Image (cartoon, helix red, strand yellow):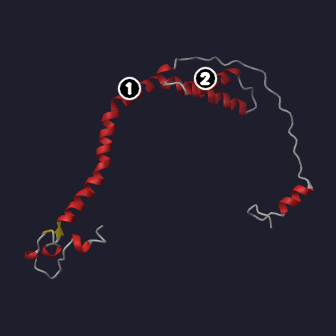
Amino acid sequence: AFTLGSSYLLGSFQVNDDIADLVLNAGWDASDGLVTYPCMILLVGYCVIWLLPVAASCWKRRKTGVPRRLAQQEVDQQEAQWKEDYLKLCEGAAASSEGESKTEGNEELERIVEEEADVPIQQQEEKTVEPKAVEPKTSEPKTVETASSDDVAALTALDGNGFAR
């Protein structure tokens, strides 16, 4: 707006003009001074628009502050149990990645964590799960298929983008 309507919003003041002749408030006509009423209105509107997020943030903090603090206190009470459950889950994952047997208790813990993720905090109850040892599962060797000559011919007929040549 300032670029397109600068001659309407702002008057002129040359460097060689006398400072005593400078009039800041030009009224409605830009030839009478430096800043017109429409320019002042535009500047005030610009400042108000920049302050709206501050007002919205204050309103949001005031409106949701008490429920958020109550929810935070409730979560803080359950934090120790969550961390303990997570450590048990990590220990089970580490044991299974090292080739050791994955315990049935850890699978039970994973199931409980998945179930409680959908339940509101107020409805959750504390549960303790003891891990139980189970027999390790044996994995069968995997077979690898080789590409046929038809597959190779089809792939070589494509350019780098996957389109036919």
Q: Amino acid at mark 2?
A: Ile
Q: Quadrant of residue 39?
A: bottom left
Q: Position of residue 163 (x, y in %)?
A: 76, 63
Say which quadrant the N terminus sits in.
bottom left
Q: Position of residue 28 (x, y in %)?
A: 15, 68
Q: Residues within 10 Å of mark 1 (few under 14, many from 20)?
A: few
What is the spatial separation of the Cα atoms under label 1 and label 2, in whole angstroms?
Answer: 25 Å
Q: Is residue 118 above or below residue 132?
A: below
User: Which of the two discs, 1 and 2, labels the residue nearer the N terminus?
Assistant: 1
The furthest residue to the left: 20
- Judge by depth and name the residue closer to the eye, 127 or 51: 51
- Judge by depth and name the residue closer to the eye, 96 or 8: 8
**Residue located at (70% from left, 29% from top):** 95
Q: Amino acid at mark 1?
A: Leu
- Judge by depth and name the residue closer to the eye, 145 or 25: 25
Residue 51 placement, left or right of 95: left
Which residue position holds label 1? 70
Which residue position holds label 2? 112
Q: How many marks?
A: 2
**Residue located at (62% from left, 28% from top):** 89
**Residue located at (33% from left, 29% from top):** 66
Q: Quadrant of residue 155?
A: bottom right
Q: Position of residue 127 (x, y in %)?
A: 56, 17
